[in-house]
Amino acid sequence: MKICIVAGARPNFMKVAPIIRAIQVAKTEGKDIDFSLVYTGTATDLTLETSLFQDLDIDAPSVFLNVECESMNELTGRVMAEFENYLNTTPTDIVIVVDDLASTLAVSIVTKKRGIVLAHLVAGTRSFDIKMPKEINRLVIDGLSDLLFVASAGATSIATKEGAENSRIYMVGNILIDTLRFNRNKLVRPQVLEQLQVEDKEYIVLTLNRKALLGDTDNLKKMCEALIQAANGKPIIAPLRGYAKQVVESCLPALPGNLHIVSPLSYLEFGYLTAHAKGIITDSGNVAEEATFNGVPCITLNNHTEHQETVSIGTNVLVGEDAQKLGEAVKTLVQGEWKKAAIPDRWDGRSAERIVQILLNQ
């Protein structure tokens, strides 16, 4: 059995790494299974530092489609063409796609047209906001997929209501937790904590990436000011990349003394930073999931989340893009009055094992 695993952006590798390791274990046990790892972007992508693959204990992709452009429609078309060329030269039985990117959609369409089995990792996630391009991607990818690997009972219910047959839906659990558990004892305390002379649990982490949030600079400035004031002197450490860094610095030309914009960290360093924080402010669903697993209070700068269990069971709260709500939530965080939380069902680190067993049974 030849599996093609496709990643379209840096966060995808955290979710496919456990599957790669599980396939390698199955091979050593004599199972007839192998894989190739394909990245739709370029080998020179600055987000793919060499340490990332070392930290995840996997090899770098064996194939790069070398598609890089801003227009989502252009990207979709170019990925479709390049992936078609890949399939023309590489025998493939199953293609695994991850999440909801334009490149994920492109690969899914080509796979289905070629009559190859398509598996969607983290299927059944919805924001229920059809204005979001990623929501359209999710609907189409799930509709095309032969195997829907869902993380929760809620995602199973969504897939069922949308017409997916029960035989196509597999509740495998949260694959991201496999990676967190695998690396739990390998985390590296970042040097920046020493440089700032900050102790564990005495700082707040800020991450920003969502284009809609960064695009409204007037409101972003209000939110940053509310965060800084509510932090009441607590250090705020923000490992921001490229555009996000530029936007925040333009909003706050004179950075307050307790806001520290630092260089992006390695995967294991960032994992330590968030796991040992007093709290996290983010617009990332993955970071919110990690916060729930680590029991760290988390404030998400969005009105909805595709990971509802992080709110209903975990440590996450949603404040949208409302500066006042953000300030109130940060005050609660700083005062140590956060809600009680638990780890959701099937966050046990065995999702990849379940997925590989399902693939072997096809």
Image: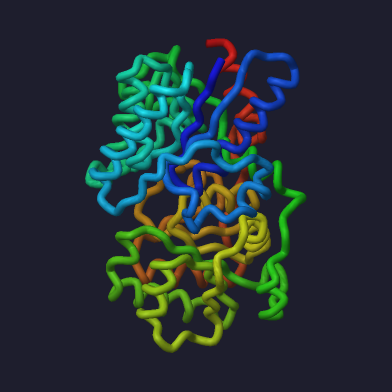
Outermost front residue: 89
Q: Quadrant of residue 216?
A: bottom left
Q: Quadrant of residue 236?
A: bottom right
Which residue does the image show at 54% across and 29% down from the upper left?
A: 36
The correct choice, above or below, for 13 with respect to 165 in the image is below
Which residue does the image show at 39% across and 22% down from the upper left?
A: 88
The correct choice, above or below, for 238 with respect to 266 in the image is below
Q: Position of residue 166 (x, y in %)?
A: 43, 14
Name the foreground residue: 358 vs 246: 246
Query: In the figure, is residue 321 to the left or right of 184?
Result: left
Q: Position of residue 356 (x, y in %)?
A: 60, 22
The correct choice, above or below, for 284 with respect to 111 in the image is below
Which residue does the image show at 51% across and 72% down from the upper left?
A: 331
Residue 278 seen in the figure = yes
Query: In the figure, is residue 175 to the left or right of 304?
Result: right
Residue 153 seen in the figure = no
Q: Position of residue 358 (x, y in %)?
A: 56, 17
Which residue does the image show at 44% across and 71% down from the upper left?
A: 245
Q: Position of residue 336 (x, y in %)?
A: 62, 67
Count of numbered marks? 0
